[in-house]
Image (cartoon, helix red, strand yellow):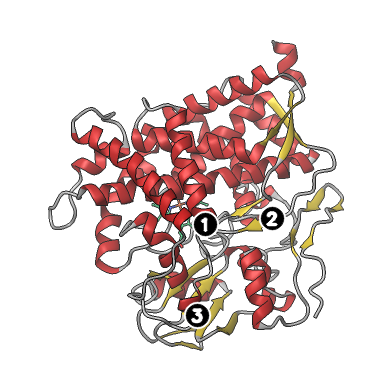
Amino acid sequence: MKLGPRWHSRIERQGSSFVPPYPHRRTDPANTFELVRLYRNSLISVFSKRDYKRDVISTRFGLLDVHTVNTVDLVKEALHVHHETLQAKTPQMRHALKPLLGDGLFVSDRETWASRRAVVSPIIHASRVKDFAPIMLDVVAEWRDSWLALGDGAEVDVLAEMAELTAEIISRTVFGRRLGREFTAEIVRGFSQYQAHVDQLDVLSLIRAPDWIPRFQSRAARRALRRVHRVIDDIIEEFAQGRGDETAVIAQLFSSRDAEGNKLTREAIRNEAIVIFMAGHETTANTLAWAWYLLSQSERVRTKFHTEIDALGHLPGFADVRELIYTRSIIEETLRLYPPVPILGRQALDDTQIGDTFIRKGSVVMICPFMLHRKRSIYSRPDYFIPERFDERIAKRPEKYAHIPFAIGPRICPGLMFGLTEAIISLATLGQQFDIDLKPGHEVQPVCRLTLRPGATLPMLLRRRQAQRKAA
Ligand code: HEM
């Protein structure tokens, strides 16, 4: 059976709007073998043209029932109303990440999750973002200066640059400001090696094998794990000796107590530090990389963006973030088109029902923000890049359960405001200085492993903006 081209990568333009690339939508059904291949290549390629219009897609992967729910009401039921039954992550996710995160918030459920959520969420919550903003501003200013030193027209891999920038921000936030870039790079290398050697497809789960059966882990994955854990344990020891940066998240984890009034163990602190680092770094990096790509393809949006950031007349500060409404709309539209976490998966802890669909205990329920965000019954011209949809001065915001790049319900991303603020500050600060153009001839194709990226690299050219050259 022919699967056709993997990507709709032709950029369609209509007037001043355009359709950026999205995965090819099959018109014919795929068999299990092909689904597994597509799943391995890129998780979001499995859905057909018909799936995008459907409300529930029920299928069977081996012995595992998988239900993908795809309406605003059903998303609300799955992630909010039935949170108690559907709070657990999928066996795939748990087995892939547990060796790295232990009982950390991201992969835990029930009492452990509730207890950790109550500790971690207030530390990175919206109300705390102003305390972390100076780190964001410092790191972005360092990046602007290092880009200026490269000279006009320099080629950079914007995906790698954004990954390093956001890693540095989250690293200083979690571990303190004194450790330097080599420390951050060491942790990121460990994560990347672990991710590269971990199989996303846990075949044992497809035959409903119980959790206690150990999953295979390659030697390379175990080596990467040991490396990350050792580096972070050393830092935690520094904090335990009273030598850590007191403003860092780790220091706050040390002084926190759970619902029973107990202090977190060293291992729990390590697990939550890794969760925050991991959850808060690649997601924001991908958002920024996609935003630069989208801006490079739309002269109309880029002009409006420049008008807003130039009107500031100074470097953006934390207080300006709420005024940068169009910049925020660009980020939100980027998150709609390319949600960094394009699929949310849950496993039913008990029998339940969503809408008319019976969900058997142990089945997997998936919510696919990537597909929901492109549903014609929810968004007009859903594949087009139109930031104005999120411009609160002229449009009514899409409803809460229709725009879910940060998930929704009790497990909603606690770093939502942190991530949004970081993305707005970075885009506005670098956008004041640079026009960033796609390298001629480079074709962008979305790839989804754990997160959704614009390919393996994103080569772009940094051009100093005319207005800035005149001012210099
Ligand atoms: C644009 C940036 C970001 C996006 C799109 C994003 C998205 C998400 C999503 C979709 C989830 C839920 C995953 C699921 O339930 O399966 C999540 C969870 C989480 N995120 Fe974010 N995130 C971003 C930035 C951040 C940042 C900056 C931090 C930390 C400072 C952070 C910390 C977390 C944590 C700790 C969780 C686990 C919450 C739980 O399981 O209760 N995220 N994020």
Residue nearer the viewer, 246 or 183: 183
Q: CA distance from mark 1 to mark 2?
A: 21 Å
Q: Amino acid at mark 1?
A: His
Which residue occupies the extreme front position in the image? 219
Task: Give the number of the disc on residue 178.
Answer: none
Of the numbered discs 1 and 3, the one sitting upstream in the chain is 1
Q: Residue at x 58, y 74 (%)?
A: 70
Question: Left or right: where does residue 343 sit relative to residue 437?
Answer: left
Distance from mark 1 CB to nearest ligand 1 atom below 8 Å: no
Q: CA distance from mark 1 to mark 3?
A: 20 Å
Of the numbered discs 1 and 2, the one sitting upstream in the chain is 1
Is 437 rendered above or below residue 40? above
Q: Secondary structure at mark 1?
A: helix
Q: Which label sits in the foreground, 1 or 2? A: 1
Name the residue tied to disc 2: 446
Q: Amino acid at mark 3?
A: Leu
Picture quarter with the C terminus: top right
Tell whether label 3 touches label 2 (CB within 8 Å): no
Question: Left or right: where does residue 88 sit relative to residue 51?
Answer: left
CA neighbours of label 3 inside 10 A, class few (<14), some (14 to 19), many (20+): some
Name the residue tied to disc 1: 197
Query: Could you tell me residue 425's position as x and y percent?
Result: 54, 33
Query: Could you tell me residue 6's position as x and y percent?
Result: 77, 65
Which residue occupies the extreme left position in the image? 261
Residue nearer the viewer, 87 or 30: 30
Task: Give the number of the disc on residue 206.
Answer: 3
Number of numbered discs visible in the structure rendering: 3
Q: Amino acid at mark 2?
A: Pro
